[in-house]
């Protein structure tokens, strides 16, 4: 069963998370962790079912623990909590995720802190890219359809109101904000092995964001692969592609986290 937990996140405010034990859990054993990061960012992990980003499937493939955090910006905790992410994309949410991971490691001794993987799509992909430049605690990362260069993403999205809302305007008026929160500005720190996933038909975050990230990782010599879907958009929806997605993602995590 899925377990809910609450910890003190950014500004010492309560933040909710969820933990799913490995399906073949045995007390006394250590298990690797898949740390899932939701998109939106105004979204949330909740009581719903989908074949995309299904926690049970992630747990069952390789017998992993799976954790999910509803960081600042998530819905369902009041409008102030949701709005607190605007203009602060790599701020409070990052603090929440790191404090949430600390809480998991301290309170669930079966989690092997040396075998943790971070996985995210859309805003979760952005945060995966942000993690690349700000922490080395994950053994590997999966970045799916994430923003890498905030300035170039502005000119290629079909949802132009969104960056104007989140960052307070266009890059030429809010250059400091874009540069502060753009993951590509911290590329010199990238070390964690990363799988990049992107669809050619993604008009929310153009496929060039994925290619830009993958090229950067390759130039830096960071172990990396790219899974490219010529017939998918911001979501992977075709059944045969979903099967390939799960296999590629889980194989990548197993490569770095399985024993």
Image: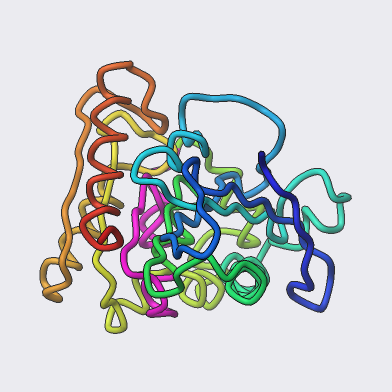
The answer to whether residue 178 is seen in the rendering is yes
**Foreground of the two, 205 or 19:** 19
Residue 58's image quarter?
top left
Quadrant of the snapshot with the N terminus = top right
**Which residue appears at 44% of the width and 60% of the height?**
31
Residue 88 visible here: no
Up-down relation of residue 88 to residue 242 (above or below): below
**Magenta-span inclusion, residue 62:** no
Query: Relative to residue 86, is residue 24 drawn left or right?
Result: left
In this orientation, which residue lies closer to the viewer: 225 or 180?
A: 225
What count of labels does the image hold? 0
For residue 156: magenta? yes
Which residue is nearer to you in this view: 71 or 6? Answer: 6
**Span highlighted in magenta in the image:** 131-157
Indicate the position of residue 54 as horizontal and vertical percent values.
50, 34
List x then y, in percent, for residue 68.
60, 52
Tell which residue pokes out farthest to the bottom in this image. 188
């Amino acid at each position: 069963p899925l377990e809910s937990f609450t910890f003190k996140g950014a500004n010492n405010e309560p933040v909710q998370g969820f933990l799913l034990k490995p399906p073949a859990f045995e007390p006394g054993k250590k298990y690797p962790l898949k740390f899932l990061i939701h998109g939106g960012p105004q979204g949330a992990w909740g009581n719903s079912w989908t074949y995309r980003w299904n926690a049970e499937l992630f747990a069952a493939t390789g017998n992993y623990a799976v954790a999910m955090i509803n960081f600042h910006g998530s819905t369902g905790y009041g409008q102030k909590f949701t709005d607190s992410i605007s203009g602060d994309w790599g701020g409070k949410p990052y603090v929440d995720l790191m404090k949430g991971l600390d809480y998991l490691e301290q309170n669930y001794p079966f989690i092997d802190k040396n075998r943790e993987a971070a996985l995210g799509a859309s805003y979760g992909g952005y945060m995966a890219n942000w993690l690349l430049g700000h922490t080395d605690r994950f053994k590997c990362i999966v970045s799916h359809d994430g923003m890498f260069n905030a300035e170039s993403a502005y000119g290629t999205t079909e949802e132009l109101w969104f960056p104007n809302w989140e960052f307070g305007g266009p890059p030429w008026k809010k250059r400091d904000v874009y540069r502060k929160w753009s993951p590509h500005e911290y590329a010199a720190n990238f070390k964690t092995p990363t799988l990049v996933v992107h669809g050619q038909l993604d008009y929310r975050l153009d496929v060039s964001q994925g290619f830009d990230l993958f090229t950067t990782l390759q130039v830096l010599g960071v172990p990396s692969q790219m899974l490219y879907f010529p017939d998918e958009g911001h979501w992977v929806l075709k059944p045969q592609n979903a099967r390939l997605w799960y296999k590629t993602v889980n194989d990548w995590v197993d490569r770095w986290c399985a024993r």
